[in-house]
Amino acid sequence: MSYLELENLTRHFVKKEGVFVKRKTTVKAVDGVSLSIEKGEILGLVGESGCGKSTLSRLVMQLLAPTSGSVVLEGERLADLPRDEIRKRRRDFQMIFQDPYASLNPRMTVFSTLAEAILTRHPEWKDDSDPLEKAVSKLMERVGLDSRYVRKYPHEFSGGQRQRIAIARALGPEPKLILADEPVSALDVSIQSQILNLLRQLRDELDLTMIFISHDLSVVRYIADRIAVMDEGKIVEVGEANSLFEDPKSETAKTLLAAIPKIAYGTG
Amino acid sequence: MALLEVNDLRTYFHTRDGIVRAVDGVSFDVEAGQTVGIVGESGSGKSVTCYSLLGLIPQPPGKIEGGTAKFGDLDLLSMSERELRSIRGSKVGLIFQDPMTSLNPYLKISTQLIEPLLIHRQISKSEALARAIDELAAVGIPDPEKRIHSYPHEFSGGMRQRVMIAMALITRPEILIADEPTTALDVTIQRQVLDLIKARQEELGTAVIFITHDLAVVSEVCDYVNVMYAGRFVERADVETLFTKPRHAYTRALQRSIPAMQAKGETLYTIPGLPPNLASEVTGCAFAPRCKNAEGDPPHSVGRPDLAELESGHWVQECPGCLAAPIS
């Protein structure tokens, strides 16, 4: 049994149309997705916009209930759990979003942002500032931020540093799975590499399990162990990252690969 | 003589924190039909360069401190707002990064698409509408007679960018300025939009100034590339030279840091540090603090280095430290 299993996960949205005569149309946003992810693995998830990547990630995050199928984490079927248990499990899943400008609360200092995240796992530190402060400093150092900046606000940081704060916040509750949704798309090339290096380093140090969603295949190839290609709600191809690049089987993968702008000149 | 000759353009912003030298002495030419790229990180001044040419800099706090931009007999930088209005959208077209925010959500595509024709070309509304339908067909919008009466929200992101391209080209401008036109789109749509811009350019002979931070896109669409750093060009060359024989440390470092160029599992090459804060005056070589050759052997330029033409058409900032810096 794998660390995380998605079993025939399906989510349909019913759209009601018409004023007098009601018609129902069903949109199969996620349509029978089965995937397994091992502990410490980075799975890349790629596909065009509208293919169901975001719906799938919301299902995994337990933000949406599946129409059928289930998410199994360490042998525990999450759909069978009562609601308040699911709430407790939610800290096991953390997200890193695309835009570090929009995903941090501008009125909270780095300390309060990170402390809030840590307290979900260690509520006993609420009235005990000493271990909490230590944990915040440790977290900041882990993602390469100077812990002297702990009282600063998000606007005082650059885009790359903000993404580091967002990553630290995701690590705060000691999650079992991190879902990174286009975490480097909004960043400049030189900053992109810094964040990708950080994510890899964290995976090695903490044995993190990650689903990495991106439309930039060259980035996914670099960071992911395996890549899953999605189209119209279905997984059309899963494979080891390099072999999928060299020998794509599905039409979707071929189209996506052909679309990447390439540097036509050998550099050096 | 080139179609557009920009000479020593300087645009400063006078803010409470001091004078921000966003563009500090930039010169480039655009030949008819050519695609000229301006590439750099965010905040390097690439957009300000182009907006200065069209008088789109908010003044104050912005101010064009000097330079000329010869466009035929005209100097774009010394024209009045009234005169500029007859150029913008007529002789120079513009496409922005985000097609979601650059179309008016309250107006039908038809109204927005014929507007430049009604303003700049004295033709009737029905004639303009016919031209607009042809233009939509040319950018690959299916069923243009019907779709022209839709509102922007009825189009997808890629389709909206096509509408923007149609709108920018409907007056047959001599120059099209494209400011990160594909950054907000996903790969397959990006591919379609890049191909479309190229096809339309070849058909109409329009010159394009292409602003982007994506080197791979630059290598595909541009004929000539200007690499911008801290308000100045550090290297200028035709696209092949720039990618096969880059000389400046910044250009080489940028190319090294593209993930696609590196083997899997290897730690990615990164440029340490951040670009300089332009609110304080940069003396000497702006890239020196981030250069692998930070110790300076040979030393970095003490004054701000000027561009020197190393080979015909290949200009590099003459800073001994940056030229000699090892990368890796």
Image (tube, coloured by chain):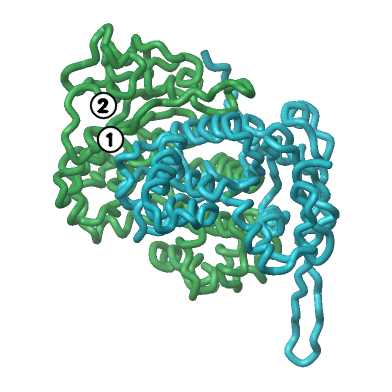
The residue wearing badge 2 is B286
Of labels 2 and 1, earlier in sequence is: 1
Report the amino acid beneath label 1.
Answer: Gly
User: Mark 2 and 1 residues: CB-CB less than 8 Å, in contact?
Assistant: yes
* Image-based side of A124 in relation to A38, left or right: left
- Chain of the residue where label 1 is placed in the rendered structure: B
Q: Nearer the viewer, mark 2 or mark 1?
A: 2
Do tags 2 and 1 sit on the same chain? Answer: yes
* Image-based side of A74 in relation to B318, left or right: right
Secondary-structure class at tag 1: loop
How far apart are the alpha carbons under marks 2 and 1? 10 Å
On the image, the x and y values in percent for residue A185 come to 53, 43
* Residue at figure coordinates x 55%, y 34% from the top left: A202
Q: Nearer the viewer, residue A181 or B102?
A: A181
- The chain assigned the colour cyan in the figure is A
Name the mark on residue A213: none
Q: Is B322 drawn above or below residue A92 in the view shown?
A: above
* Residue at figure coordinates x 80%, y 49% from the top left: A75
Secondary-structure class at tag 2: loop
The residue wearing badge 1 is B231
Location of the N terminus of chain A by quadrant is top right
**How many residues crowd mark 1 within 10 Å: few (<14), some (14–19), many (20+)?**
many
- Give the colour of chain B: green
* Residue at figure coordinates x 77%, y 31% from the top left: A240
* Residue at figure coordinates x 73%, y 27% from the top left: A242
On the image, the x and y values in percent for residue B230 come to 29, 33
